[in-house]
Image (cartoon, rainbow, N blue to C red):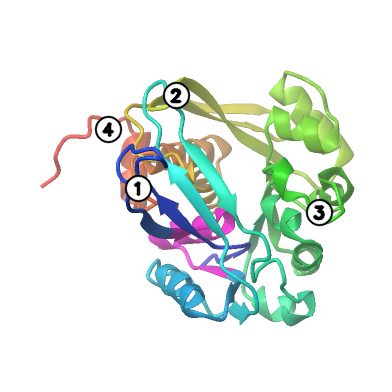
Amino acid sequence: MSKTVTFGEIMMRLTTPGHQRFAQAASLGITYGGGEANVSAALAQMGMPAAHVTVFPDNDLGRAAAAFFLKSGIDTSHFQYGPGRLGLYFMETGESLRPSRIVYDRYESAFAHLDPAAFDWQQILAGANWFHWSGITPAVSAPAARATADAIQTARQLGITVSADVNYRRVLWQYGKKADEVMPDLVAGCDVIVCTLGDAADIFGIQTDNFQEMARRMMQRFPNLKKVIATRRDTLSASHNRLTGICFDGTEYTESPTFDLNPIVDRIGGGDAFMAGFIYGTMQYGDTLRALTFATAASSLKHMIEGDFNLVTVAEVEQVMQGEVSGRLLR
């Protein structure tokens, strides 16, 4: 069966109860997540083998985070432990006119201090047919960027499909390199990327307000790219969005049906659910429109689930694809 490997940091998420603001909260709920790990966890929920590669601090918090993802069903045999701390992020959930807010605290994490030589990518990627990373990982530290480059190079040598969510985060690039100095060489090794108009402008200097034109120019610059995908989000309020999946393959533009998300429970991880859905759909259906629709339906369902990753089955996603969106009680 198809196997996906992902690489990136896992953090502890601390969330205020309900819709409380940070100033109101007397307690915080604990869960764990990370963009790439969320992809693996979502795939595992859909019955597809998935492994995640990361580094945790060698302490009780690191072990707790590892145990949380072990429950998701992913292969955790490539988890490593080292010096440093567990990255954190704090979240208050918005409602209606008030947006959600996130505060990151991940400086000097164990993942940032990883040793690139500690990863045997030939062994890690053996038997895999898809490798996924995101732009967050090379932004964390120079060693993380080096390990990402090593993984991509090995994946290409092994004929493994490589995908990335380029995911620009300006505040993370603090180790002396800028995104436009690092990301192009990494994206050059990709077959599929999630890239928005903003990402293309900020990282690659591509200025356009047309998705197809942006994707075409990205594919001209990076000839290995076969598909550029993204979601188009219409934000009516913090708790009411509309979501459409879009894709350009160098010749054809594809757009999924639009899904109405109201009310949103938790939008964190929606992009990761989209990526996981696209990987699953591509492997199982072999049809771009169906894969894109599956991905967008999966992402839409994630908005109705608390936590970072998508706890849904293939059958549930396919029901939404078929128009079953009434939310009626199932017995």
- For residue 309, say whether it is visible: no
Q: Which residue is mark 3?
A: 186
The x and y percentages for residue 27 are 33, 53
**Marks 2 and 3: CB-CB under 8 Å?**
no
Residue 109 horizontal/vertical position (percent)? 64, 66
- Circle 2 packing at 10 Å, graded few (<14), some (14-19), many (20+), is some
Identify the secondary structure beneath mark 4: loop
Question: Contact (CB < 8 A) between labels 4 and 2?
Answer: no
Distance from label 2 to label 1 (Cα)?
Answer: 19 Å
| Residue 41 percent location from the top left of the image | 46, 61
Decide which of 325, 114 is in the foreground and name it.
114
Please rate how many residues cluster around mark 1, counting C-alpha atoms within 10 Å: few if below 14, some from 14 to 19, many from 20: some
To which residue does mark 1 refer? 306
Front-most of residues 96 and 298: 96
Q: Are marks 2 and 1 in contact (CB under 8 Å)?
A: no
In this picture, residue 328 sits left or right of residue 173: left
In the image, which residues are magenta? 32-52
Mark sitting earlier along the chain (1/4): 1
Amino acid tagged 1:
Glu
Earlier sequence position, callout 2 versus callout 1: 2
- Type of amino acid under label 3: Leu
In the image, residue 40 lies in the stretch drawn in magenta: yes
Amino acid type assigned to the residue bearing label 2 in the image: Arg
